[in-house]
Image: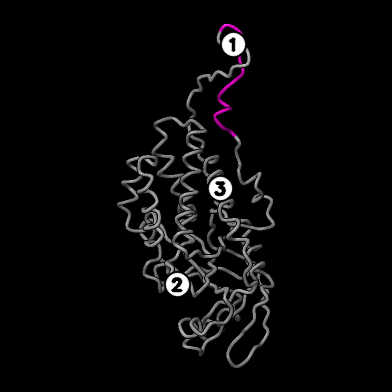
Amino acid sequence: MCAWRELSTPDECGMRNVGPAACRRLTVKSTLICSAAFNLSHHSPNSSENSTSQATGFSMSWTALCRQRHGAKGPPGKSVCRSVKPKAMDHRFLRTQLLRKQNLIWDDFDSADHHKLLLHYTCPNGFFGIIESGEIWCTDIRDLNDPQEGTYALEVIKSVSARNRDRVGQRFAKEVSHYRSLFGLNESWTMYVACFCSAGEQDYMWRNYACEGRGCAIAFNYEKLLSGAKNGKKYAIFRVLYDRAAQEQMIEATLEHAFALEVTLNLRSEDHELFWMKEVAIALISCASRFKHPKWQCEQEFRLMITDPSDA
């Protein structure tokens, strides 16, 4: 498998070369062409999809299973539950609801103020390659410098799932405990990423990602990258979360929504395992893909990501 994926930069990215010695403005004009689609949603502050009413997606509750009845079956004014036949699982509907919930639970985090210019640190050869071709290449996650990519996020999921073992089901809890990486990451599927720093120029970043200060940092306009994602259809662009307590809260919120969704939709018993092993797993991947170990917090990373296969 090729370790790199080609991803053209958005039209009019407004890239700038900034460095210790000089600052020279450069503009790259290029049509956005993504070699692989990423089907997980991302937050877009101006998107109507992320409004509270639409993000909630469904308003069914136990009261929807009860009707007001009169006559021999019960006194006037008394609610009587009627039997509802369990429904076959609608995968598309479930996935839509679970991923919309991700937009909702990440809304405050994504809406927080941050630098509008995201710096991509690189060596001189990488800089000239990006400027001359108008393209930025996404790296296989296995080739990044963090050996815990995928494994740390799984640790967070395992910790929260263990506390909810009776609710998630024995098989799901068992399968999660046996995974070595994020639901088979680097085994059955992988991520390709381009990394950006939102903390401005940092000595640490120059030293570790720009040839010990001899390289370059290219500034990308965040709004342009966000609009180029086409609501997650082209790629995902997101801010990375480092706080362990906050990470566990995100997983808790994802699981709580899954519990409520399963009960509210009254799924058939035979669909229980498939619901958790497929649909909930995808929502957890969407959530935990944004986690990194707290020791990397100084990087204040934004990440552009695509997956292989694209429907992973």
Which amino acid, by three-letter code, is at mark 1?
Pro
Q: Going from the N terminus, do you reach mark 2 or mark 1 first?
A: 1
Total number of numbered discs in the rendering = 3
Give neighbour class at mark 3: few <14, some 14-19, many 20+ (Cα, 10 Å): many
Q: Quadrant of residue 9?
A: bottom right
Which amino acid, by three-letter code, is at mark 3?
Lys
Which amino acid, by three-letter code, is at mark 2?
Trp
Q: Which residue is mark 3?
A: 101
Say which element carries label 3: helix
What scheme was used to colour the molecule? one colour
Alpha carbon separation for disc pair 2 and 1: 64 Å
Say which element carries label 1: loop
Query: From what the image shows, is residue 192 above or below residue 104?
Result: below
Q: Going from the N terminus, do you reach mark 3 or mark 1 first?
A: 1
Q: Which residue is mark 1?
A: 75
In the rendered image, residue 45, in percent from the top left (x then y), is placed at 66, 58
Give the number of the disc on residue 112: none
Query: From what the image shows, is residue 86 above or below residue 109?
Result: above
Q: Residue at x 35, y 50 (%)?
A: 176
Q: Nearer the viewer, mark 2 or mark 1?
A: 1
Q: Which residue is mark 2?
A: 296
Give neighbour class at mark 2: few <14, some 14-19, many 20+ (Cα, 10 Å): few
Alpha carbon separation for disc pair 3 and 1: 40 Å
State yes or no: residue 87 in magenta.
no
In the rendered image, residue 236, in percent from the top left (x then y), is placed at 56, 60
In the rendered image, residue 56, in percent from the top left (x then y), is placed at 60, 43
Range drawn in magenta: 60-72
